[in-house]
Image: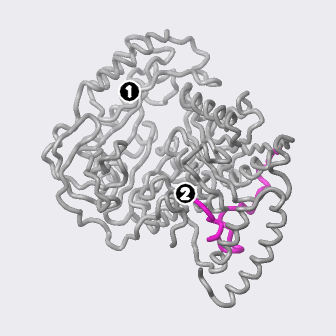
Amino acid sequence: MPELCPSGFVEDIEDVVKPGSDPVSVPTRNLVVPRIKRSNKDIAKATGDSFLPGTHKIYVKTWGCAHNSSDSEYMAGQLAAKGYSIVEDASSADLWLLNSCTVKNPAEDHFRGAIDSGLRQGKKVVAAGCVSQATPNVEYLKGLSVVGVQQTDRIVEVVEETLKGNSVRLLGSKKDGRRKAGGAALTLPKIRRNPLVEIIAINTGCLNHCTYCKTKHARGDLGSYSIEELVARAKQAFQEGVREIWLTSEDTGAYGRDIGETLPDLLREMVAVVPEGCMLRLGMTNPPYILDYLEDMAEILSHPRVYSFLHVPVQSGSDPVLAEMKREYTAAQFRTVIDFLRKAVPGITIATDIICGFPTETEEDFEETMALVREYRFPSLFINQFYPRPGTPAAKMKRIPTHVVKERTKRLSELFQSYQTYDGRVGQRQAVLVTEVAHDKKHLVGHNKFYEQVLLPMNEDYMGQSVDVVITSAGKHFMHCEVLALGSSMDKTLPRPLPKGQVSGVQSDAPTQHCLRDVRLVCRSWSGHWQWTASVFIALVSAFLAYVCTRRGVTL
């Protein structure tokens, strides 16, 4: 496949879409009726024949979880497949697509700040993600176009209406018959942030009603994709050079309970299509659901092509606090999960989350949480201060004084920083899968079987490869190593990954599309009153070139 997006930018992706085989448009739209507000602003700039679809630059910014990242990848892919250029320089963009997170106040504050910044710079703005879905009528979203978390397959419509000066809001949910569906089709075009990593959301929503959580207001009840859809997406990813798949959702452990399947059912099917040398990583699961199949999960997490890693958020070590959070498990049940997995999967990495300062948390409650961390010495611990999210039951509870919340957060952070978990790895020989560049731009990042981070020297030959190393030193969150050799486990028939910025799922096999590229570029260089003339001219020339190329079988 030719490179479509050199240097990380997308241009002229519509040139590779087969005529009559549109991978972006949605054939059935009777489920959601868009609400369009027409504005007189900028009417002279972008109305009527002066607007040419696919000729603008789009900046995409994402906050939050891997599910949000996947949504952004799909939205960027659909826009690129329609000819829009996805750019990293926000100042050069015509429109900002902002994909929000509603878990914490700071994330929403940053989202709101980005909206204000974009509008001040005269940019068109489209609001997406969980904040936009959960609270579309907040003051700072008034007048903006909004696309809901299950309407990402219609992002092209929303963007084009916004560029014309209109305001569009699509907030409905997808249905599969009478039940809620997992979301937009997994076959849509996407642009992977990392060409070596495929993020697949296996379901949306959850079964819980946690009193502090705003995400439930956005993602709603559980909706799972079928195993067939998910396996097909994984196969396609590996055919496009992906080396690592992340399975994500608001709660992977709840997968399939709405369609008569289970998470182990899915994982067994997924593992069967993972090539040698590639890896599968499972995302966050809440304790209540994994309790039902601990033995199955231990077997799967022990598989050589599955990371022995699991993210199981506990939130508190106190049963009264867990009950008031409506977490639906006890501290003892959480311990059961950890104890079983650590025994059945030696070396497994368990990551967890803790909320400090929940409104009903007493000093005794907090000490129970501290004791839990001392006992298990989690190698990865996400510490969060309680934030009252509007509309949640916990937001109505009497809050603990801020200085107490900060003090507890500080104590827990100091406890976490007081111990090392990787010192015993020094001298060990390990195989690591290298998939990214470190933040310092001086190292590559690989992960061993336990999804522990190993830093390697910069060498492009290592990227996307399994590399044999020996650990030379260890820090709190990573290890340094000496490279021994490229590993022998990688499937030699695997294709090279797509170039960064190239659209997944779009094939370039129609010569007529290549024939039109230069003509479209000429058309894009014209502006103002000449655009109507250009539109007529391009239609005539395109028809002629398509005819000639088809007759001669020419590929330019």
Give the residue drawn at x 57%, y 36%: 101
Which region shows up in magenta?
Answer: 9-36
Q: Which mark is residue 55?
A: none
Image quarter (top left, top right, bottom left or bottom right) of the C terminus: bottom right
Give the residue drawn at x 76%, y 43%: 169
Q: Left or right: where does residue 438 sit relative to residue 549?
A: left
Q: Quadrant of residue 167 in the image?
A: top right
Residue bearing the label numbered 1: 331
Determine the main secondary structure of the stretch shown in magenta: loop
- Label 1 sits on a secondary structure element that is helix
- Label 2 sits on a secondary structure element that is loop
Given the image, on which type of amino acid does mark 2 rest?
A: Phe
Q: At which x and y percent is residue 360?
A: 49, 14
Q: Is residue 459 magenta?
A: no
Residue 322 in the image: above or below residue 180: above
The CA span between labels 2 and 1 is: 48 Å
Give the residue drawn at x 59%, y 78%: 509
Q: Quadrant of residue 346 in the image?
A: top left
Q: At which x and y percent is residue 445?
A: 32, 49
Residue bearing the label numbered 2: 9
Given the image, on which type of amino acid does mark 1 rest?
A: Ala
Q: Residues within 10 Å of mark 2 (few under 14, many from 20)?
A: some
